[in-house]
Image (cartoon, grey):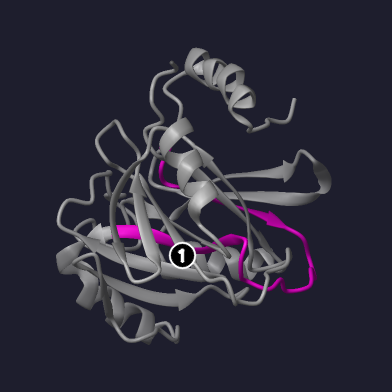
Amino acid sequence: MPAPITGLHHVTAITADAQKNIDFYTGVLGLRLVKLTVNFDDPGSYHLYYGDELGRPGTIMTFFAWAGAFRGKVGPPQVTATAFAVPAGAMEFWTTRLSEKSVTTQPLATRFGEPVLTFADPDGMPIEIVGSADPKGTPWATGPVSAEHAIRGFHGVTISEEGYENTAKLLIDVMGFTSIGSEQNRFRYQAGSGDRFASIVDLICVPDARHGSMGAGVVHHVAYRAGDDAVQLAWRKKSPARGSTFPP
């Protein structure tokens, strides 16, 4: 049995406008642009990487910058929200900051006992800020947002599906996640080891929702953390035997 997965590593999405994307994720959310490369699968476009000061696993939000890409449709079976963690006491700050930056937010909600602020990035991709009693992570000490309020990394992702059972089985039986609760049609799972940093996957069962489509404003993929190369190789050997596949 490979060493357990400890949580999220990175989330990659698509943007149609690199400059607007940079302005939002650095200037509004206060993340650091830790790296800019070409997209190695599409060298004619850029790949943007945001994260904490050091670009630690569990903080990295990346974007394939495809200029002028058509906007995708967010819906099942896709990641339909990416959530960042902040200290619970920082929610008033973020409500005010987003308003001052002319970002429209939904009314502050409570989910599994935590405050949640929902809004969209310039491409229309749903983003959440979640106030956590113990958000883990290390704030960027000299970033544009004060350390006491700064994003610490991911809280988790939400995946919407017509039926959640198969993905739940994969998370629990193969990836070692644990079911930790449910609210209405939302089912929460947490990575089974580590310090619980960036470790949440929520599954939403929406059998009648309109299907999503790939494009700008849509998550392309989610990556999970393995402790080292040997652990990653062990997972590559294990998962195909359990019905999952990996690219070469």
**Residue 203 left/right relative to 66:** left
**Residue 69 left/right relative to 242:** right
Measured as percent of width and height from the top left, residue 72 is found at 71, 71
- Asked if residue 55 shows in the view, the reply is no
Q: Residue at x 59, y 66 (%)?
A: 21
Q: Quadrant of the C terminus?
A: top right
| Mark 1 element type | strand
Q: What span is in magenta?
A: 56-85
Q: Residue at x 43, y 15 (%)?
A: 1
- Asked if residue 17 shows in the view, the reply is yes
Along the line of sight, which residue is nearer the eye, 213 or 88?
213
Q: Label 1 belongs to which residue?
A: 204
**Residue 181 left/right relative to 189:** left
Q: Amino acid at mark 1?
A: Ile
Along the line of sight, which residue is nearer the eye, 50 or 158?
158
Measured as percent of width and height from the top left, residue 28 is found at 43, 70
In magenta stretch: residue 225:
no
Measured as percent of width and height from the top left, residue 150 is found at 29, 59
Q: Is residue 152 above or below residue 19?
A: above
Along the line of sight, which residue is nearer the eye, 140 or 154?
154
